[in-house]
């Protein structure tokens, strides 16, 4: 005699857990601060707390503004971690773990003049993508496809935008930079 048992499994979204990936070829950056170690692995941001010895995933469901992280940058002098996203959004995490979003580059309207299409998909263009962030004199200089933006690290606001002149850019009223 054979018995068939049906099992129903119900998992709620709040019970999902993201497990850390320690060994992978996708490790991009590791920044060791006084109290924490931040690292980007397979486009996921993790923080290791040196006091509690716990590792936490930082993502949109807990503290970040977006999920698709392209790179992280750290200013040692200001103790600020800049999280750049593939959609050109930026989050800044200070030494206390406070997160400030800087959406000005993401919100800018860029009219691309030099581009190509491959099978109907926009390719080979310079747009809003964040290529690099470097730091000097209390400012973060964000290199983009259209030029660069200067962020005042004391206020975490964009104070200047320079376009390479290859395209026009237009800031919406809701993307005020000053």
Image (spheres, rainbow, N blue to C red):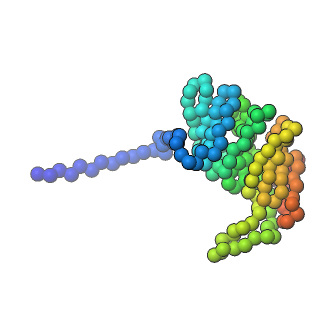
Tell me the quarter of the picture where residue 96 sits. Answer: top right
The image shows residue 103 at horizontal and vertical percentages of 76, 50
Residue at image x 83%, y 57%? 147
For the residue pair 142 and 59, the one nearer the viewer reads as: 142
State the residue lying farthest toward the bottom: 119
Tell me the quarter of the picture where residue 31 sits. Answer: top right
133 relative to 1 in the view: left or right: right
State the residue lying farthest toward the front: 25
> Is residue 155 among the parts visible in the rendering?
no
Establish if 111 lies above or below 49.
below
Establish if 97 lies above or below 3.
above
For the residue pair 174 and 98, the one nearer the viewer reads as: 98
The image shows residue 93 at horizontal and vertical percentages of 71, 37
How many marks are shown on the rendered structure? 0
The image shows residue 50 at horizontal and vertical percentages of 61, 26
Residue at image x 68%, y 48%? 71
For the residue pair 101 and 40, the one nearer the viewer reads as: 40
> Is residue 76 among the parts visible in the rendering?
yes
State the residue lying farthest toward the top: 51
Residue at image x 80%, y 49%? 142
The image shows residue 24 at horizontal and vertical percentages of 53, 46
Residue at image x 39%, y 46%? 10
């Amino acid at each position: 005699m054979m018995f068939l048992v049906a099992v129903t499994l119900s998992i709620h979204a709040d019970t999902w857990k993201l497990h850390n990936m320690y060994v992978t070829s996708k490790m991009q950056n590791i920044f060791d601060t006084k109290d924490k170690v931040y690292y980007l692995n397979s486009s996921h941001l993790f923080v290791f707390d040196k006091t509690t010895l716990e590792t936490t995933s930082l993502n949109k469901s807990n503290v970040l503004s977006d999920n698709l992280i392209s790179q992280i940058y750290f200013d040692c002098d200001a103790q600020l971690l800049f999280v750049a996203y593939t959609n050109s959004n930026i989050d800044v995490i200070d030494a206390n773990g406070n997160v400030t979003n800087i959406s000005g580059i993401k919100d800018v309207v860029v009219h691309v003049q030099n581009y190509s299409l491959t099978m109907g998909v926009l390719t080979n263009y310079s747009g809003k993508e964040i290529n690099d962030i470097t730091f000097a004199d209390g400012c973060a200089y964000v290199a983009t496809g259209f030029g660069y933006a200067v962020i005042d690290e004391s206020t975490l606001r964009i104070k200047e935008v320079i376009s390479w002149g290859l395209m026009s850019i237009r800031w919406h009223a809701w993307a005020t930079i000053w």
